[in-house]
Image (spheres, rainbow, N blue to C red):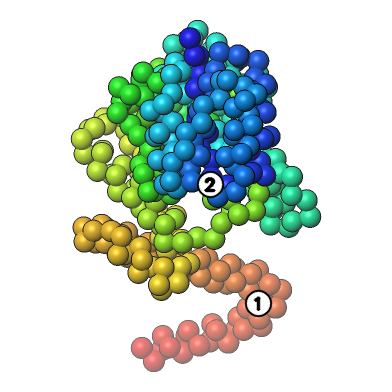
Amino acid sequence: MVKISVIIPIYNMENYLAECLDSVISQSLREIEIICINDGSTDNTQYILDQYKKKDNRIKVFCQTNAGLSVARNEGIKYSNGKYLIYLDADDKLQHQALKELYFAAEKYKYDIVYFSAKVFTTEKGNDFIENEMNRLNTYYLRNMNIQKPIKGIDAFINMFRGDKYLVSACLQMIRKKYLLESNVKFCEGLLHEDNLYTFFTLFNANKVGCLDREYYMRRIRSNSIMTSRYTHRNVYGLFISYDKILQSLDRWNISDIEANNYIDLYLKRLIDESIRIYLLLTEDEKQKFLNDISERQKRLFKLNKEIGDIKWTINDLESKKLELNNEIEHIMNSLSYKVGRVITYLPRICRRKLIKLRG
């Protein structure tokens, strides 16, 4: 029996693919299959895959014309035979014991989904941008929470948000295939930031969720990756569509938990705020491309949120200026020169008030 299917979408990863595959074929859990989806690579990716396929018959290679990460993952799910599924990006790696420990935990507690943490690494030295990213993300992928006894997905969502550790990366979770098929959730094709929808919908439908406080995944920080690339209209589109689809789903779900609703609202706010923030950074041409890709209803929704954001920004700016003025006034009133001036002008002020009173 195949215990875990490792799904690896690959597009032009000749520099990193061997290291990625080595981390999987050397796993202490042997009953696995490695589903490699060559997403129309134009470099030596296919040659590397052919060589590794000869070395290890657990590697299965499927080719498609370039269609993007979501299509590749969905194809990997279709071809998989494992009881559990895990996603691995072709420039990343897995820790040696990762699959064994995840599998036995999932079997013991009958998880629908089990979450875990990641450690960042890089092989690019002397790059200021990469070094800044390493510092910024050093603890970002650490969940710092341990949930062994299974809980419902909505409760896991609350716990993650309480600790500010709701991480949407599909690579930081292992899911039971039967549950995934029953929930009818797929990766939204043609969408950047597709993990927002996948993780939200699979988590909220789950009955048994766990989280292991282990850094099983190793995320590479490198130049020219999706995470470090320049923003385009596709980034705005991906975030906004995620916001819109989740917002529409809430009308059907009718969630009664007040705390869950509060955190959902916070998550939706993050999605829409980030989409507007990136939109404002785009060129006029890129902005128009985004607007051309959405419906009239979505345009009204986006415009409304943008106007609300503008009003909030104005209010915050005024509040900030008010605080600055109050601090300046307080500073003046506490100054020695102000206090001396009050003493010097005490008698003239008394006389002035009496004169005004007499004239009245």
42 relative position to 85: left or right: right
Q: Position of residue 68 (x, y in %)?
A: 44, 46
Q: Residue at x 65, y 53 (%)?
A: 223
Give whichever of discs 1 and 2 has the lower sequence position: 2
The C terminus sits in image quarter: bottom left
Q: Is residue 311 in sight in this rendering? A: no
Q: Position of residue 280 (x, y in %)?
A: 44, 67
Camera-side residue: 302 or 68?
68
Camera-side residue: 155 or 340?
155
- At label 2, which amino acid type do we have? Ser
Q: Position of residue 14 (x, y in %)?
A: 64, 44
The numbered disc on residue 338 is 1
44 relative position to 350: left or right: right
Q: Is residue 241 in sight in this rendering? A: yes
Secondary structure, mark 1, is helix
Q: Quadrant of residue 209?
A: top left
Q: Residue at x 27, y 31 (%)?
A: 255
- At label 1, which amino acid type do we have? Tyr
- Give neighbour class at mark 2: few <14, some 14-19, many 20+ (Cα, 10 Å): some
State the residue position of label 2: 41
Secondary structure, mark 2, is loop
Q: Disc 1 and disc 2: Cα gap in Å? A: 73 Å
Q: Residue at x 64, y 19 (%)?
A: 27
